[in-house]
Image (cartoon, rainbow, N blue to C red):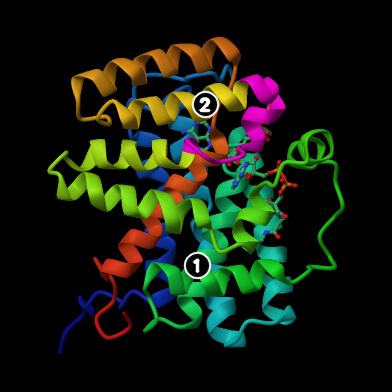
Amino acid sequence: MHAFNLQAKPVTLAERLADLAVEALIDEADLSPKPALVDRRGNGAHTDLHLGLMHASALTLWPAFKEMAEAAIEFGEVGLPLREAIGRIGREGERAMLATTGGINTHRGGIWALGLLVTSAALAPQSRAAHAVAARAARLALLDDADAPRVLSHGAQVAQRYGARGAREEAQAGFPAVIQRALPQLQRSRDAGHGEQNARLDALLAIMAQLADTCVLYRAGEPGLHAMQQGARAVLDAGGSASLAGRRRLHELDQQLIALNASPGGAADLLAACLLLDRIASGDGMIQGAF
Ligand SMILES: CC(C)(COP(=O)(O)OP(=O)(O)OC[C@H]1O[C@@H](n2cnc3c(N)ncnc32)[C@H](O[C@H]2O[C@H](COP(=O)(O)OP(=O)(O)OP(=O)(O)O)[C@@H](O)[C@H]2O)[C@@H]1O)[C@@H](O)C(=O)NCCC(=O)NCCS
Ligand SMILES: Nc1ncnc2[nH]cnc12
């Protein structure tokens, strides 16, 4: 007779996907040196954010990601009931995030992008190629959540002013910044032997080179967006983060974006989405048999 059952409780698919989502957010936050963003060096263009807050925010979101994956398993298909369920869970996640951060928006875009991807991955765990997971997530994002409050968010204000397509449209299009730019760049830089941190920085730069980041537009207008896109392209053209010339350009970009108060928070969220899709596709650390 044993007094205690020492066998660990098996981790469920939903729990493991939530782990991967939180890990992706933390890996994004830790990655350094990121231009004008919070990282291990400092607060970038932010006065109200720091690395500890980004970590705390990411950890706070674990239950929301798990519940989204569980809802996917329960409903079993892309449809309005699942869309409305994850919308409700996403808004609860936002409230939890704001309670943790004292009202600072750390991960609104992250909840949206990674929430859709976690839900999509849980819907069809055997279909884990990045483009397949992103395409299912896009079908979910295209469904209108009638319960979503119509607020004049920063993204909505920027859409009115500049006609920019933001986080919603990026998801509805199947995350082209991730599928067509970040993941291929991540792979190219890995294949070139540039090291994992440099490969991740290059993936972020590939996103920044083309994204209409509504955070940058809101804070710094079109000159800020132009500086972000041109500067990121210049780093990649100079040889990327692993090269000396690329590092110089990266430093210049950091200084320039901080001076413009242009923080590419949307690009940072999409880097986290890229890291999550990369992990899901590789099956790295997934549950035996489920993935
Ligand atoms: C559909 C929603 C995404 C809402 O979208 P909308 O554009 O209306 O709302 P925003 O509040 O502006 O949030 C969008 C966030 O998405 C990130 N982002 C920006 N551009 C892009 C892009 N082109 N592609 C993808 N993602 C993008 C970005 O998030 C990061 O920036 C945040 C900081 O931004 P901001 O609030 O502007 O903060 P500051 O400038 O720092 O403010 P001040 O200090 O100056 O005051 C940071 O959080 C990063 O995450 C945008 O902020 C969706 O959110 C939604 O509908 N949610 C409801 C719940 C739901 O249905 N969830 C679904 C479950 S999965
Ligand atoms: N590292 C970061 N710095 C600032 N804003 C962000 N939003 C998401 N990640 C971020």
Tell me the element at label 2: helix
Residue at (41%, 31%) from the top-left corner?
233
Residue at 85% in and 46% down: 151
Q: Residue 74 vs residue 285: left or right? A: right
Q: Nearer the viewer, mark 1 or mark 2?
A: 2
Q: Is residue 162 above or below residue 250?
A: below
**Quadrant the C terminus occupies:** bottom left
Sequence-first tag of 1 and 2: 1
Residue that badge 2 annotates: 228
Q: Measured from the top left, where is residue 173 in percent x and y?
A: 61, 62
- Residue at the extreme front: 237
- Magenta segment includes 214: yes
Q: Is residue 224 left or right of residue 160?
A: left
Q: Tell me, yes or no, whether the highlighted magenta stretch contains residue 81.
A: no
> Which residue: 33% across, 54% down?
184
Q: Which mark is residue 134?
A: 1
Q: Which residues are magenta?
A: 208-223
Residue 143 position by quadrant: bottom right
Residue 71 shows in the view: yes
Q: Does the closest atom of ligand 1 sit within 8 Å of the Cβ of label 2? A: no
Question: How far across and down, in percent of the image, does residue 226 sit?
Answer: 58, 25
Kindly identify the amino acid type of the residue bearing the numbered disc 2.
Met
Q: Nearer the viewer, residue 54 or 178?
A: 178
Does 277 sit above or below residue 186? below
The amino acid type, in three-letter code, at marker 1 is Ala
Q: Secondary structure at mark 1?
A: helix
Percent x, y for residue 60? 52, 49
Question: In this view, which residue lies farthest toward the left?
Answer: 193
Q: Is mark 1 within 8 Å of ligand 1?
A: no
